[in-house]
Image: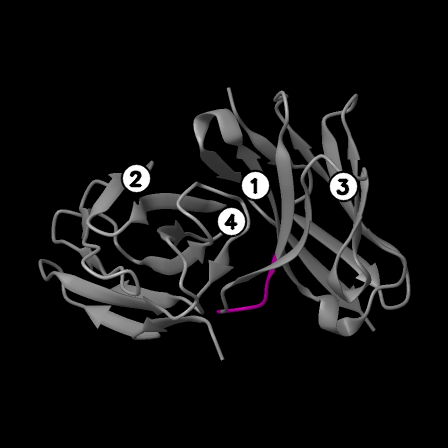
Amino acid sequence: DGGITQSPKYLFRKEGQNVTLSCEQNLNHDAMYWYRQDPGQGLRLIYYSQIVNDFQKGDIAEGYSVSREKKESFPLTVTSAQKNPTAFYLCASSIGGRVTGELFFGEGSRLTVL
Amino acid sequence: AQSVTQLDSHVSVSEGTPVLLRCNYSSSYSPSLFWYVQHPNKGLQLLLKYTSAATLVKGINGFEAEFKKSETSFHLTKPSAHMSDAAEYFCVVLYSSASKIIFGSGTRLSIRP
Protein backbone atom coordinates (compact mmCIF):
# COMPACT_ATOMS: atom_id res chain seq x y z
CA ASP A 1 0.00 0.00 0.00
CA GLY A 2 1.18 3.51 -0.79
CA GLY A 3 1.67 5.96 1.97
CA ILE A 4 3.96 8.05 4.11
CA THR A 5 6.13 6.47 6.78
CA GLN A 6 7.54 8.54 9.61
CA SER A 7 10.05 7.25 12.10
CA PRO A 8 10.61 7.07 14.93
CA LYS A 9 7.09 7.39 16.36
CA TYR A 10 8.43 8.52 19.73
CA LEU A 11 11.78 10.11 20.42
CA PHE A 12 13.43 11.48 23.52
CA ARG A 13 16.33 13.89 23.34
CA LYS A 14 18.54 15.61 25.82
CA GLU A 15 18.95 19.35 25.56
CA GLY A 16 21.74 20.35 23.21
CA GLN A 17 21.44 17.30 20.96
CA ASN A 18 20.44 17.30 17.32
CA VAL A 19 17.89 14.75 16.20
CA THR A 20 16.74 13.68 12.74
CA LEU A 21 13.19 12.60 11.94
CA SER A 22 12.68 10.39 8.93
CA CYS A 23 9.92 10.76 6.32
CA GLU A 24 9.60 8.41 3.37
CA GLN A 25 6.80 8.26 0.79
CA ASN A 26 6.01 5.79 -1.98
CA LEU A 27 3.16 7.78 -3.50
CA ASN A 28 5.36 9.28 -6.22
CA HIS A 29 4.41 12.75 -4.99
CA ASP A 30 6.56 15.70 -5.96
CA ALA A 31 5.87 17.97 -2.99
CA MET A 32 6.66 17.19 0.64
CA TYR A 33 6.10 19.19 3.82
CA TRP A 34 7.03 19.25 7.48
CA TYR A 35 4.58 20.61 10.04
CA ARG A 36 4.79 21.12 13.77
CA GLN A 37 1.73 20.63 15.97
CA ASP A 38 1.40 21.95 19.52
CA PRO A 39 -1.62 21.39 21.79
CA GLY A 40 -4.54 23.68 20.97
CA GLN A 41 -2.90 25.06 17.87
CA GLY A 42 -3.20 24.39 14.20
CA LEU A 43 -0.36 23.01 12.19
CA ARG A 44 2.55 25.33 11.47
CA LEU A 45 4.74 24.86 8.41
CA ILE A 46 8.43 24.31 9.03
CA TYR A 47 9.79 23.55 5.55
CA TYR A 48 8.46 22.35 2.24
CA SER A 49 9.94 21.00 -0.96
CA GLN A 50 8.30 21.04 -4.37
CA ILE A 51 11.05 19.21 -6.20
CA VAL A 52 14.19 17.22 -5.51
CA ASN A 53 17.21 19.27 -4.40
CA ASP A 54 15.06 22.31 -3.65
CA PHE A 55 13.20 23.40 -0.52
CA GLN A 56 11.77 26.55 1.03
CA LYS A 57 11.41 27.81 4.58
CA GLY A 58 7.99 27.85 6.08
CA ASP A 59 6.69 30.01 8.90
CA ILE A 60 8.82 28.54 11.70
CA ALA A 61 12.05 27.29 10.07
CA GLU A 62 14.47 28.62 12.70
CA GLY A 63 16.30 25.79 14.47
CA TYR A 64 15.38 23.21 11.83
CA SER A 65 17.06 21.92 8.68
CA VAL A 66 15.99 19.61 5.85
CA SER A 67 17.33 17.93 2.75
CA ARG A 68 15.66 16.53 -0.36
CA GLU A 69 18.18 14.35 -2.14
CA LYS A 70 15.62 11.81 -3.30
CA LYS A 71 11.99 12.23 -4.33
CA GLU A 72 10.90 9.67 -1.76
CA SER A 73 12.68 11.12 1.26
CA PHE A 74 12.48 14.40 3.19
CA PRO A 75 14.26 14.13 6.57
CA LEU A 76 13.96 16.87 9.18
CA THR A 77 16.75 17.69 11.62
CA VAL A 78 15.81 19.43 14.83
CA THR A 79 18.94 21.23 15.91
CA SER A 80 20.07 22.40 19.33
CA ALA A 81 19.22 25.92 18.18
CA GLN A 82 15.51 25.14 18.34
CA LYS A 83 14.51 26.61 21.68
CA ASN A 84 11.35 24.64 22.32
CA PRO A 85 11.50 21.44 20.28
CA THR A 86 9.05 19.30 22.25
CA ALA A 87 6.13 18.81 19.84
CA PHE A 88 4.35 16.46 17.47
CA TYR A 89 5.89 16.56 13.99
CA LEU A 90 3.93 15.66 10.89
CA CYS A 91 5.23 14.97 7.41
CA ALA A 92 2.93 15.32 4.41
CA SER A 93 3.05 15.10 0.65
CA SER A 94 0.95 16.23 -2.29
CA ILE A 95 0.67 15.40 -5.97
CA GLY A 96 2.53 17.63 -8.40
CA GLY A 97 4.98 20.40 -7.68
CA ARG A 98 2.45 23.12 -6.86
CA VAL A 99 1.31 23.78 -3.32
CA THR A 100 -2.15 22.26 -2.94
CA GLY A 101 -4.39 21.84 0.06
CA GLU A 102 -4.91 18.15 -0.59
CA LEU A 103 -2.25 16.64 1.65
CA PHE A 104 -1.44 13.08 2.58
CA PHE A 105 -0.03 12.77 6.10
CA GLY A 106 2.18 10.35 7.91
CA GLU A 107 1.32 9.21 11.43
CA GLY A 108 3.67 11.66 13.06
CA SER A 109 6.70 11.65 15.33
CA ARG A 110 6.45 12.85 18.92
CA LEU A 111 9.66 14.46 20.14
CA THR A 112 10.22 15.09 23.83
CA VAL A 113 13.22 17.00 25.11
CA LEU A 114 14.26 15.97 28.60
CA ALA B 1 -4.40 39.11 6.19
CA GLN B 2 -4.99 35.46 5.41
CA SER B 3 -6.62 33.63 8.30
CA VAL B 4 -8.88 30.77 9.25
CA THR B 5 -11.02 30.82 12.38
CA GLN B 6 -12.61 27.80 13.93
CA LEU B 7 -15.19 29.28 16.22
CA ASP B 8 -15.29 26.47 18.79
CA SER B 9 -12.28 24.82 20.36
CA HIS B 10 -14.46 22.02 21.76
CA VAL B 11 -17.88 20.68 20.77
CA SER B 12 -19.71 17.96 22.66
CA VAL B 13 -22.81 16.21 21.31
CA SER B 14 -24.79 13.10 22.15
CA GLU B 15 -24.55 10.06 19.94
CA GLY B 16 -27.22 10.17 17.23
CA THR B 17 -27.61 13.98 17.29
CA PRO B 18 -26.39 16.42 14.62
CA VAL B 19 -22.88 17.79 14.51
CA LEU B 20 -21.96 21.35 13.52
CA LEU B 21 -18.34 22.52 13.44
CA ARG B 22 -17.90 26.12 12.37
CA CYS B 23 -15.20 27.66 10.21
CA ASN B 24 -14.75 31.17 8.83
CA TYR B 25 -11.95 32.38 6.60
CA SER B 26 -10.66 35.71 5.40
CA SER B 27 -11.89 36.55 1.95
CA SER B 28 -10.03 35.46 -1.13
CA TYR B 29 -10.89 35.59 -4.80
CA SER B 30 -11.09 31.84 -5.22
CA PRO B 31 -10.24 29.92 -2.09
CA SER B 32 -9.96 26.20 -1.91
CA LEU B 33 -11.31 24.88 1.37
CA PHE B 34 -10.77 21.60 3.16
CA TRP B 35 -11.71 19.74 6.32
CA TYR B 36 -9.34 17.24 7.89
CA VAL B 37 -9.85 14.85 10.79
CA GLN B 38 -7.17 13.72 13.26
CA HIS B 39 -7.56 10.88 15.72
CA PRO B 40 -5.29 10.91 18.80
CA ASN B 41 -1.59 10.56 18.03
CA LYS B 42 -2.29 10.05 14.34
CA GLY B 43 -1.78 12.00 11.15
CA LEU B 44 -4.53 14.02 9.49
CA GLN B 45 -6.93 12.55 6.96
CA LEU B 46 -8.83 14.52 4.33
CA LEU B 47 -12.60 14.53 4.97
CA LEU B 48 -13.71 16.72 2.09
CA LYS B 49 -12.70 19.61 -0.16
CA TYR B 50 -14.28 22.54 -1.96
CA THR B 51 -12.61 23.78 -5.12
CA SER B 52 -15.23 26.05 -6.80
CA ALA B 53 -17.63 23.37 -7.99
CA ALA B 54 -20.87 22.62 -6.08
CA THR B 55 -21.21 24.65 -2.89
CA LEU B 56 -22.44 21.66 -0.90
CA VAL B 57 -19.63 19.18 -0.62
CA LYS B 58 -20.02 15.60 0.55
CA GLY B 59 -17.16 13.84 2.23
CA ILE B 60 -16.34 10.56 3.86
CA ASN B 61 -18.13 9.08 6.89
CA GLY B 62 -21.35 11.02 6.23
CA PHE B 63 -19.86 14.50 6.68
CA GLU B 64 -20.86 17.48 4.53
CA ALA B 65 -19.80 21.10 4.30
CA GLU B 66 -21.41 24.10 2.66
CA PHE B 67 -19.42 26.93 1.12
CA LYS B 68 -21.12 30.29 1.71
CA LYS B 69 -19.22 33.04 -0.05
CA SER B 70 -21.32 35.88 1.36
CA GLU B 71 -20.59 34.71 4.90
CA THR B 72 -17.01 33.53 4.18
CA SER B 73 -17.91 30.30 5.97
CA PHE B 74 -17.35 26.61 5.40
CA HIS B 75 -19.11 24.81 8.27
CA LEU B 76 -18.90 21.04 8.66
CA THR B 77 -22.02 19.04 9.48
CA LYS B 78 -23.17 15.50 10.03
CA PRO B 79 -26.81 14.53 10.61
CA SER B 80 -26.15 11.88 13.25
CA ALA B 81 -23.00 11.59 15.35
CA HIS B 82 -21.32 8.27 15.98
CA MET B 83 -18.90 7.43 18.77
CA SER B 84 -16.16 6.90 16.17
CA ASP B 85 -16.47 10.57 15.12
CA ALA B 86 -14.71 11.68 18.30
CA ALA B 87 -11.54 13.36 17.05
CA GLU B 88 -9.95 16.73 16.27
CA TYR B 89 -11.17 18.50 13.14
CA PHE B 90 -9.22 21.10 11.19
CA CYS B 91 -10.52 23.61 8.68
CA VAL B 92 -7.88 24.44 6.06
CA VAL B 93 -7.75 27.13 3.39
CA LEU B 94 -5.49 27.27 0.37
CA TYR B 95 -4.75 30.77 -0.84
CA SER B 96 -3.61 29.91 -4.36
CA SER B 97 -2.24 33.33 -5.23
CA ALA B 98 0.24 33.10 -2.37
CA SER B 99 0.70 29.32 -2.54
CA LYS B 100 -0.14 29.31 1.14
CA ILE B 101 -2.01 26.72 3.20
CA ILE B 102 -3.51 27.98 6.46
CA PHE B 103 -4.74 25.62 9.16
CA GLY B 104 -7.39 26.56 11.70
CA SER B 105 -6.59 25.88 15.34
CA GLY B 106 -8.85 22.84 15.43
CA THR B 107 -12.10 21.77 17.07
CA ARG B 108 -12.16 18.80 19.38
CA LEU B 109 -15.38 16.82 18.94
CA SER B 110 -16.56 14.70 21.87
CA ILE B 111 -19.46 12.27 21.61
CA ARG B 112 -21.56 11.45 24.68
CA PRO B 113 -23.12 7.97 24.84
Q: Which residue is tagged 1?
A: B104
Return the mark for residue A60: 2
Under circle 1, the secondary element is: loop
The number of numbered discs placed on residues in the rendered structure image is: 4
Under circle 2, the secondary element is: loop
Disc 2 is attached to a residue of which chain? A
The answer as to whether the residues below labels 2 and 1 share one chain is no
Give the image quarter of residue B29: top right
Q: Which residue is tagged 3?
A: B75
Q: Earlier in the sequence, mark 4 or mark 2?
A: 4
User: How far apart, in angstroms, are the residues tagged by discs 4 and 3?
Assistant: 19 Å
What amino acid type should be assigned to the residue bearing mark 1? Gly
Residue B38 among those drawn in magenta:
yes
Q: Which residue is tagged 4?
A: A40
- Quadrant assignment for the C terminus of chain B: bottom right
Q: Is residue B105 visible?
A: yes
What amino acid type should be assigned to the residue bearing mark 3? His
Q: Residue at x 37, y 44 (%)?
A: A45
Picture layout, residue B29 above or below residue B78: above
The answer as to whether the residues below labels 4 and 3 share one chain is no
Q: Earlier in the sequence, mark 1 or mark 3?
A: 3
User: How far apart, in angstroms, are the residues tagged by discs 3 and 2?
Assistant: 28 Å
